[in-house]
Every structure is written in structure tokens, then in C-alpha cells.
């Protein structure tokens, strides 16, 4: 898990979630509010083996099955562009 000190206090100290590798590295991360996904992209860029990203709005009461964990791609849902994302990306396109 990649987090900041507050995330560590909540997920590890308070909730005692069974993370085996926790990296506290986002305490001093600065970026514009519009780039709210920047920490996620930074975390993705640091991976050197397959990984599963789980957002805070997911609830997994049990571990994923072995077949899911070893899949080439796991997705919660198909991403369909919204006007929010279209307006953000229009300058790049």
C-alpha cells in the first residue's frame, strides 16, 4: 500500500488491515487540485510486477479468487468518458 502518514494511521494502526508492504511517501506531495489522480499515477509508475489497484470506494470482504488475481486485466467497470474528463483532455487532443 502506498499512502501518507494519515492513511497509515487509519488503515494500519486503527483498522489493522493486513497489508504486508506499506510505503509512506505522500506526506509532502504537492500538485494542483485538478490533478487529483496524480498520486495514483505515481504509484502505478513505481510498480515492477503485476498489481491490483483498489480505490477507497471498493468493499472486498474476502480475498479475490486465485483466477482473478492472476488475470491479465481486472476491471470493476468499463470506463466511459464523462464531460468532466472530456473537458480536461480536450486541450491534449
Image (spheres, rainbow, N blue to C red):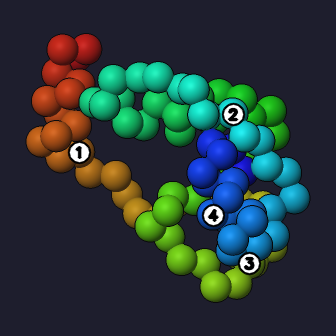
| Residue at (63% x, 63% y) in the render | 10
Q: Is residue 47 above or below residue 57?
A: above
Ranked by sequence position, the earlier of labels 4 and 3 is 4
In this image, 5 relative to 35: left or right? right
Q: Foreground mark, 1 or 4?
A: 4
Tag 1–tag 3 contact (CB < 8 Å): no
* Residue in the image at 28% along x and 30% along y: 34
Q: Residues within 10 Å of mark 1 (few under 14, many from 20)?
A: few
Element at label 2: loop
Residue beneath label 1, please? 81
Q: Tell me which corner region of the image, top left, top right, bottom left or bottom right, holds residue 32.
A: top left
User: Is the residue 14 above or below the residue 48 in the image?
Assistant: below
User: Residue 51 location in percent, x, y?
Assistant: 72, 49
> Depth check: 75 or 19 in front?
19
Badge 4 or badge 2: first in the primary sequence = 4
Contact between marks 2 and 1 (CB within 8 A): the answer is: no
Mark 3 — residue?
Answer: 63
The alpha-carbon separation of the residues under discs 1 and 4 comes to 32 Å
Question: Which of labels 2 and 1 is toward the front?
Answer: 2
Q: Secondary structure at mark 1?
A: loop
**Nearer the observer, disc 4 or disc 3?**
4
Give me the C-alpha separation between circle 2 and circle 1: 30 Å
- As measured in the structure, the alpha-carbon distance from the residue carrying label 4 to the one carrying label 3 is 20 Å
Quarter of the image with the C terminus in it: top left
Cα–Cα gap, marks 4 and 2:
15 Å
In primary-sequence order, the first of circles 1 and 3 is 3
Identify residue for label 4: 10
Residue 43: percent from the left, percent from the top? 63, 35
Left or right of 71 in this view: 18: right
Residue 27 placement: quadrant: top right
Amino acid at each position: 500500500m502506498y499512502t501518507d502518514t494519515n492513511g497509515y494511521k487509519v488503515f494500519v494502526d486503527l483498522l489493522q488491515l493486513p497489508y504486508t508492504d506499506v510505503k509512506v511517501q505522500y506526506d509532502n506531495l504537492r500538485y494542483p487540485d485538478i490533478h487529483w489522480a496524480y498520486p495514483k499515477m505515481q504509484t502505478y509508475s513505481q510498480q515492477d510486477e503485476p498489481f491490483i489497484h483498489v480505490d477507497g470506494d471498493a468493499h472486498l470482504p474476502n480475498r479475490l479468487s486465485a483466477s482473478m488475481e492472476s488475470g491479465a486485466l481486472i476491471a470493476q467497470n468499463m470506463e466511459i468518458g464523462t464531460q468532466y474528463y472530456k473537458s480536461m483532455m480536450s486541450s491534449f487532443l
